[in-house]
Amino acid sequence: MIDYGFFDRPGRRVTLREVGDENWREVADVAPLDDQRSHVPAMAARYLLLSMREETWNSLAVHADDTVVGHVMWGLDEDGSHWIGGMLIDGAEQGKGLGRAVLLTMTGWLAAQEDCWTIRLAYHPDNAVAGRLYTSLGFVPTGAVDGDEVIAELAPNQVGRH
């Protein structure tokens, strides 16, 4: 379990846990709001499959107390950069500060890894809510793109300053 002591607005402790026999179904069923489906998959099951089929990504279940409320994954690129991907908070749970708590937890954990020199993520430019959240936490667009997504990065020495 990854726990950096962050809480959502209702006061639930936000932790990241391995996806396993006890929670994979709940994680697979996580779904965004309907109007977000142009930016993210219809269900987190797609991200779970990416983690299972490709060696790049590692899925984590997002828990608020003991309830699965989302999915996030991390990876290590060939250039040594650490990535956050596949963050999806269930539509019914959005607006409660979970995304911020997840990102603070992930960036803290990744920055603590011995070889972490930068943390990156990518998002669709039309996803203004995500863009504002990432910027508020210190992520800066690199000018590079991945398909139609903006790549932003955070230097590990910037973790926790926002």
Image (spheres, helix red, strand yellow):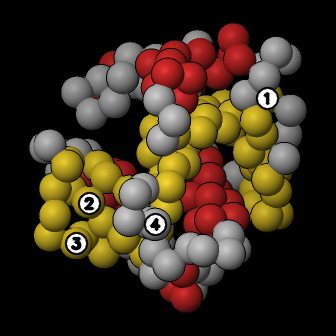
Residue in the picture at 68% in, 70% down: 113
Identity, as a three-letter code, of the amino acid under mark 1: Thr
Horizontal side of 97 relative to 9 (left or right) equals left
Mark sitting earlier along the chain (3/1): 1
Labels 1 and 4 touching (C-beta < 8 A): no
- Distance between the Cα atoms at labels 3 and 2? 6 Å
- Which label lies toward us, 1 or 4? 4
The residue indicated by pointer 2 is: 151
Residue hosting label 1: 67
User: In the figure, is residue 50 to the left or right of 67?
Assistant: left
Amino acid type indicated by mark 4: Gly
**Disc 2 to disc 1, C-alpha distance:** 31 Å
Disc assigned to residue 142: 3
Q: Which mark is residue 80?
A: 4
Q: Residue furthest front?
A: 78
Q: Amino acid at mark 2?
A: Ile
Circle 3 — which element? strand
Q: What amino acid is at disc 3?
A: Thr
Q: Position of residue 134 (x, y in %)?
A: 40, 64
Determine the CA span between mark 4 and mark 3: 16 Å
